[in-house]
Amino acid sequence: MIKIILNISIAVLLAFTAEAQNRTGTITGKVIAGGEPVVGANVGIIALQKGDATDENGVFMIKEVPTGTYKLQITAIGFKKVEREVKVTGGKTTQLEIKLDQSVLELEQMVVTGTMRQTYVKESPLKVNVVKAKQLQQGRISSNIMDLISSVNGLSTQLNCGVCGTNAIRINGVEGPNTAVLIDGMPIMGALASVYGLNGISPSIIDQVEVIKGPQSTLYGTQALGGVVNIITKNPAITPTFSADVYTKSTEEGNINLAYSPKFGRFEGFISGNILRLENYFDENGDNFNDLVKQSRVSLFGKGTLLGENMEQRLNIATKFYT
């Protein structure tokens, strides 16, 4: 008797599952520009608030879309927005290939800083300078974002300790403690936030740097009298599963950057580790003082996002360890 009831239950469950599949379909495809895949493009159905971001191959997939005809919107930084009408058939997968054209204007750059939520540069009430990761690393190799920050107009590093090598960020000449340091829009709180906040963060996990200069930055409180530096890390959904960056210099400085991006169902995240060792006595100018600060550094940074049933963000968490 129990076996008969179990078989009936399984049959009913399979029938409901088949019926649900017939009521929904899947949209998948590839976003390209100039024959190359576009990474990190946002593809979404506005009416349903469902969407996905393209991976390193430019591929996206939107599952469990109800049967019907919808307007699909594709946006990416540096490209013109595209809208396409797509018809979804129950139980079937709709394949698309979407081509984007580059935009001459940078008005559609997405920023977080200024309103404490995602918005476009042209809609932000504050003047926000956006610096992409490629601009930071032009012609320079470093294991630390603090070594590259001086390449941003108006920003410079302030050496706080010649023995331990800690430093802070000055904006337009204002002292480092008056600079608010943020990671993904979340302030790093504490008296030493501007000193240790960005040390040990590898440039390889950074998507862009957003900077607010001047009195408008007081939106973020008294710690932001000089300005705000917001480090936006890469989206876990479009980062490679594993990446490594290893280099050494003539000063016997050795550096290892590792990043792992696991994906478990609706949870996406990445863990980045940085190990630096510089213990060589290096006196090139012959003044009997070491030209470089001896240091050994271990830094870990983790970020995770829990998505809802419609791929909306339910929870964001980030943690940083530095020694």
Image: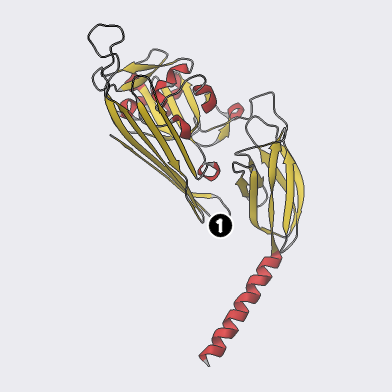
Residue 309 vs 184, above or below: the answer is below
Question: Which residue is at a point 56% across and 89% down the rendered structure image?
Answer: 4
Callout 1 secondary element: loop
Q: Quadrant of residue 74?
A: top right
Number of labels in the image equals 1
Q: Quadrant of the C terminus?
A: top left
Which residue is depicted at the point 45% across and 23% down? 141
Seen in the picture, residue 19 relative to 137 is either above or below; the reply is: below
Q: Identity of the amino acid at label 1?
A: Glu
Q: Residue furthest bottom?
A: 1
**Structure colour scheme:** secondary structure
Going by the image, does 14 lie left or right of 171?
Answer: right
Q: Is residue 30 above or below residue 108?
A: below
Could you tell me residue 15's position as x and y percent? 65, 76
- The x, y position of residue 243, in whole percent, is 48, 39
Task: Decide if residue 232 is in sight here.
Answer: no
Residue 20: % across, % down = 66, 68
Residue 16 in the image, given as x and y percentages of width and height? 64, 74
Where is mark 1, residue-wise? 309
Decide which of 263, 266 is in the foreground and name it. Answer: 263
Q: Residues within 10 Å of mark 1 (few under 14, many from 20)?
A: few
Q: Nearer the viewer, residue 128 or 42?
A: 42
The answer to whether residue 4 is seen in the rendering is yes
Residue 192: quarter of image = top left
Is 200 left, or right, of 212 in this rendering?
left
